[in-house]
Amino acid sequence: MGVFNVAIAGATGNVGREMLSILEERNFPVGELHLLASERSAGSRVEFRGQELVVKDLATFDFTGVQVGLFSPGGSVSAVHAPRAAAAGCVVVDNTSYFRMDPDIPLVVPEVNAHAIADYKKKGIISNPNCSTIQMVVALKPIHDAATIKRVVVSTYQSVSGAGKAAMDELLEQTRAFYLPGRDIPPKKFTKPIAFNLIPQIDSFLENGYTKEEMKMVNETHKILDPNIKVTATTVRVPVFNAHSESVTIETERPLSPEEARAILARAPGVEVVDDPATLTYITPREAAGRDATFVSRIRRDFTVEHGLQMWVVSDNLRKGAALNAVQIAEVLIRDHLS
C-alpha cells in the first residue's frame, strides 16, 4: 500500500482535531496532509507527526491531487465543498448530517456495513452516521445477525461535546457559577441550563413530536442495518463532557438468552463487554472517554416481551461516534478500493 494525500475540512474543530490525532495514532498512510478551515482560522498552526502545519482556507482550496477528504465543517459548508472536492477526484468521508439520507451516498459503520463503501463511486462521497446511531448499531448488528431484531426502544444520555466546544464551555461555566451565590449563567447553546440538569431535547422538534436527533436514529438505523426494524428513540442531553450512553431495549424474532447475547457481543468487532453485576462491573461515560470501543454492559432479559433483551451501551462520541468511524471508513476505502 502506498501513501495518500489527505485533506481534513474543519480541522480546527473538536472532531477535526480528533481526526488528526487518530490518523497519527493509527499510522494512516498519509503523504501530504492539508488542514482546512474557515477564512477566520486560516493561518493558524497545528502539529502533526512532530511538524507544524498551516491551516488553509477551505473556500479557496484546490482538491486536485488529494485522494481522501475527511470532512466535519458543518452541514451547510459540506453541502458546497464536498461535491467540489469529489469533482476534483477526492473521495470525501463526510461527518455532517447533510448527505446521510441521500440514496446515492452510502452511510457506513465499518463493523456493520463496510460493503456499502463500494457505492462511493456514485457521487464520490461517503457519509458518516450520527454519533448516537453509530454506537447503537455496532451493538445491534451481532444481535440482529443471531436472532433478527424486530423492535428497538432507545433512550440516550448524550454528552455536551456532541454540541461542540461552546457547549462544553457552557457546562463548565454553569457548574462553576452554581457554587457562587448571586451568579447565574443563562443558557446559550441549550434551551435550559445544562449543569446539574437533563434536557430531553436534542435538535429541533418535528411535527410528529420527535426531535431531529431522534428521527436520525430511526432513519439511519433503517439505512445502515435493516429497514424492517421498528425503532423509537428519546434523546437527552446530560451534564457529561464526553461519551454518550444509551439504554437499549431489543425485541427479537428468535429467543436469545442474556448469556448467549453476552458471548456473541464479546466476539463482535468493535465491541467490548464489561458486564458482571456480582462485582458491580459496568461501564460509565467517564471510563469510556478517550477509548475506541463501543462498550456494552447490563445485558439482561426484558420480561415484558416474549423475546426481549436490555443493555447499556457507551462510547466516546468524538472518537467512535465521529472521527474514528470516519478514519476507519477511509482505511477500508484505501485498502479495498483505492490501492
Image (cartoon, rainbow, N blue to C red):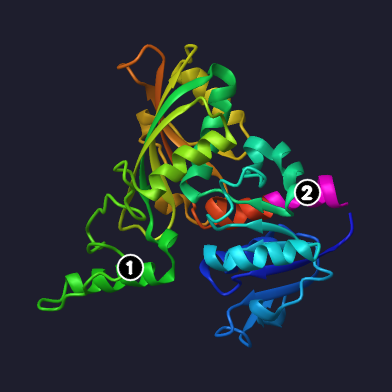
- Picture residue at 18% right of the left edge, 70% below the top: 178
Residue 223 x/y as whole percent: 57, 37
- Picture residue at 59% right of the left edge, 70% below the top: 10
Circle 1: is it few (<14), some (14-19), or many (20+) Cα within 10 Å?
some
Callout 2 secondary element: helix
Q: Is residue 332 above or below residue 43?
A: above
Majority secondary structure of magenta residues: helix
Cβ–Cβ under 8 Å for marks 2 and 1: no
- Reading the image, the residue beneath label 1 is 189
Q: Is residue 204 left or right of residue 81?
A: left
Of labels 2 and 1, the one closer to you: 2
What segment is highlighted magenta in the picture?
A: 329-339
Residue 66 x/y as whole percent: 80, 67
Q: Amino acid at mark 2?
A: Lys
Q: Is residue 276 left or right of residue 234?
A: right
Circle 2: is it few (<14), some (14-19), or many (20+) Cα within 10 Å?
some
Q: Amino acid at mark 1?
A: Lys
- Reading the image, the residue beneath label 2 is 121
